[in-house]
Amino acid sequence: MSNHRKRRRLKPRIHRRAAPGTKPGTMNVAPDALQSTFDVIAYDRDHIAEKTRVTAKELEQLITRWPVVWVNVIGLGSTDTLHAIAKTFNIHPLAMEDVVNVHQRAKSDQYESNVYCVVRMPDTNCDQLTTQLSIVLGKNYVVTFQEGPGDCFDLVRSRLRHEHSIMRQETQADYLAYRLIDAVVDAYFPIMESIGDRLDELDERTTAGDGQSAFAELHVVKRELLLLRRAIWPLRDAVRELQVEATPFVSNQTRFFLRDCQDHSVQLIDLVEAYRDIGSDIRDFHLSTVSLRMNEIMKTLTIIATIFIPLGFIAGVYGMNFEYMPELHWRYGYPFALAIMIAVAGVMLNYFKRHGWIFRGRETREALHEIDPPGGRG
């Protein structure tokens, strides 16, 4: 991920633009949303038509003529365009309200004329790592609403342009919707692989003793995993609803394909949870290492202070300068006092060493490697 060092917002910014008491189904377009444009791909087994500038009347003609029509709307800032598309495809006002409020979690809602589905599409250039993708599935059309340009549907478009591809042979709108959802789910895997590589690197740096600099980057990775978890967990439920709910817009054949899509979403959830555990292990290992080093430092300082306590006592006794102290006038009094101090210090050092309280630097390093050997969490 190119900008993985950037600190991302931990809490998504949710701006509900509808005031309390607003009538349900009211579209409140964000003032900073991009102006809406859309392109159309209509196809059957033998022909395909791609158009960029289409009027509402031409859209109605395309729906009547072609077995599958895909309308991809980019930008949610043009109220007139959104109203025209909603009228043409008979999209429910509640669904259009969710389209323009881009904080929705993944879900699937059924209406009389179509099925409305929301998924979070990966976008590494976004602070939240995902953007909202709304999908409206009808009898012979699919309408997608994106917040801005850039998506993960290039492979879908290339397959549609290939005359002998499976997508061209499956002239059903629900199969196209499945392929779009499957493309979104598969787009998460490269991101997860990138996070896995970064965790391996942070693990190696922490084990090598560079945990202090890796700690801040680990915090960023854990934030990103939390954002991905919020996007992927509801995605599994949304796909399952499409698979099991009885609706005339999803055929039994497509339900089998959606089962595979759900399996991929479960794999993503397992990866997210595993990487979160690995990140927590790296963090705990770093904190344990710091704590162990701090304990070693405190133990060393305590031993030094303990050794100097009797030495200070001896020096204090012979520093009181009483008149009747025979050692003060003895020729060997000074060497005798130093000898006593050295002997006391030697006895204490030997005692500490025998009990394993000092001179254990090698044993400490071996203990750290036993806790987590190099590459042990890879």
Image: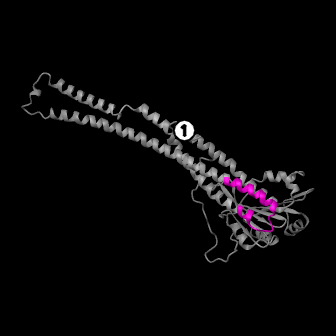
Coordinates of residue 99 in the picture (x, y in percent): 71, 66
Q: Is residue 223 left or right of residue 111?
A: left
Q: Is residue 147 left or right of residue 5?
A: right
The one of 263 and 95 positioned closer to us in this rendering: 263
Instruction: For residue 149, say whether it is visible.
Output: no
State whether the magenta stretch is mostly helix, strand or loop.
helix
Q: Is residue 111 left or right of residue 336?
A: right
Residue 344 occupies quadrant = top left
Coordinates of residue 323 in the picture (x, y in percent): 7, 32
- Give, as a single range, the part of the protein colored magenta: 240-266
Quadrant including the C terminus: top right
Residue furthest right in the image: 46
Q: How many marks?
A: 1
As helix, strand or loop, the secondary structure at mark 1 comes to helix
Q: Is residue 155 above or below residue 378?
A: below
Coordinates of residue 242 in the picture (x, y in percent): 74, 63
Instruction: For residue 207, say whether it is visible.
Output: yes
Give the residue drawn at x 22%, y 35%. Answer: 310
Residue furthest left in the image: 324
Q: Is residue 225 above or below residue 203?
A: below
Colour style of the rendered protein structure: one colour
Q: Amino acid at mark 1?
A: Arg
Does the magenta portion include 256? Answer: yes
Coordinates of residue 158 in the picture (x, y in percent): 83, 51
Residue furthest top in the image: 331
Q: Which residue is mark 1?
A: 205
Q: Is residue 107 left or right of residue 304?
A: right
